[in-house]
Amino acid sequence: MNMRCFHLPGFRAKLVPADKPLPQPTGSEVVLKVLAAGVCHSDVHIWEGGYDLGNDQTMSFEGRVKFPLTMGHESSGQVVAVGPDSKDVKVGDKCLICSWIGCRECAFCKQGDEHLCTAPRFLGVNREGGYADHIVVPHDRYLIDLKGVDPVAAAPLACSGLTTYSALKKAGPRLADDPVLVIGAGGLGMMAINLVRVMGGKGAVVVELDPLKRKAALDAGAIAAIDPKAPDVDKQIRHELGAPVYFVLDLVGSGETAALGFRLLDKGGKLVVVGLFGGAMSLSVPMVTMRAASIVGSYIGSPGELRELVQLVQTKGMPVIPLDKRRLEDANEALADLRAGKVMGRVVLVP
Ligand SMILES: [Zn+2]
Ligand SMILES: [Zn+2]
């Protein structure tokens, strides 16, 4: 029996279909039929071949990505075969796949932060991912049972869900009392608006350039959706938050958005930068001191946090984000649309 994947032959190239024999799992490996694979902005960055670091600097993925690569790190699947040493899953189980696989030996991995591993083996980044009809996962510890949850809707939890969950946790207990400011209403932003509520938070005020995305944010339950180009943007944000600005989630991560977030922080405030759009910012150093401000980066989240998140949605309900379901064969168009900013919510490829 064969499996089909859509792999990337090189930077800025079209994904191409490839058929290969379906692997037989050995050791602790598990083979799953892919039920859904989310298309994430990081895939666009892999396709482009790097990040804009600002100040005319770029970070190239040249030499870091091995081609051909099957991307897709936001997948759910159904177990079709288990290796002899796999104990905790059985054929037929529907699972969320944690792609954040580390070396298990570095200091980060030892404390459970495999997503920060210094020698990562991430599915869809460093090894074959979910833009395929089947996927091999090296150990069942990276599979989370999805009992009671729609596996197609759940796929985005593995990256956009986990990333926003881990970032929102950094707000601490004030999440329950004060609204947070969310910059960007793309896939991550829509997830954040929903997750704030699922996590028992007060709600989110959203800043977004695109009027269609502002409307989607309001439909998803945002307290307000504000145009950053408005001349009185700071005043509008403060008015809608109705409280000191203590927590800003920058899901865009451009020089402009980070500067906006930092400028607005009140005493003790925290700017959490999640997006990777690119650019640089300058800031008033004494203001960092006087406001006792924090600027924190948040990168994905740990396998343990992903388990917490699945448990949370199993008890409190699934975040409702607009899902744009497309065929695996349409992966190229999906990437192009995401790159052009034309996607509402999340595209999931359904083989
Ligand atoms: Zn991602
Ligand atoms: Zn490691």
Image (cartoon, rainbow, N blue to C red):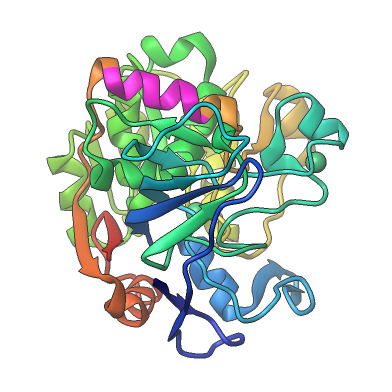
At 37% from the left edge and 39% from the top edge, which residue is drawn?
Answer: 91
The answer to whether residue 105 is left or right of residue 36 is: right
Residue 56 or residue 229, whichever sits in front: 56
Image spot of residue 25 (x, y percent):
56, 52
**Magenta part of the chain:** 306-314
Image spot of residue 303 (x, y percent):
58, 32
Q: Is residue 140 magenta?
A: no
Q: Residue furthest right?
A: 106
Residue 239 shows up from this direction: no
**Above/below status of 71 relative to 151:** below
| Residue 273 position by quadrant | top right
Magenta segment's dominant SS is helix
Q: Quadrant of the C terminus?
A: bottom left
The answer to whether residue 3 is left or right of residue 170 is: left
Residue 320 shows up from this direction: yes
Image spot of residue 168 (x, y percent):
48, 28
The answer to whether residue 334 is left or right of residue 86 is: left
At 22% from the left edge and 26% from the top edge, which residue is drawn?
Answer: 148
Q: Quadrant of the N terminus?
A: bottom left
Residue 132 or residue 179, whichever sits in front: 132
Q: Residue furthest left?
A: 219
Q: Residue furthest bottom?
A: 13
Residue 300 or residue 92, whichever sits in front: 92
| Residue 256 position by quadrant | bottom right
**Above/below status of 253 relative to 263:** below
| Residue 145 position by quadrant | top left
Residue 85 or residue 284, whichever sits in front: 85
Image spot of residue 224 (x, y percent):
22, 37
In this figure, what is the number of numbered marks? 0
At 56% from the left edge and 70% from the top edge, which residue is drawn?
Answer: 45
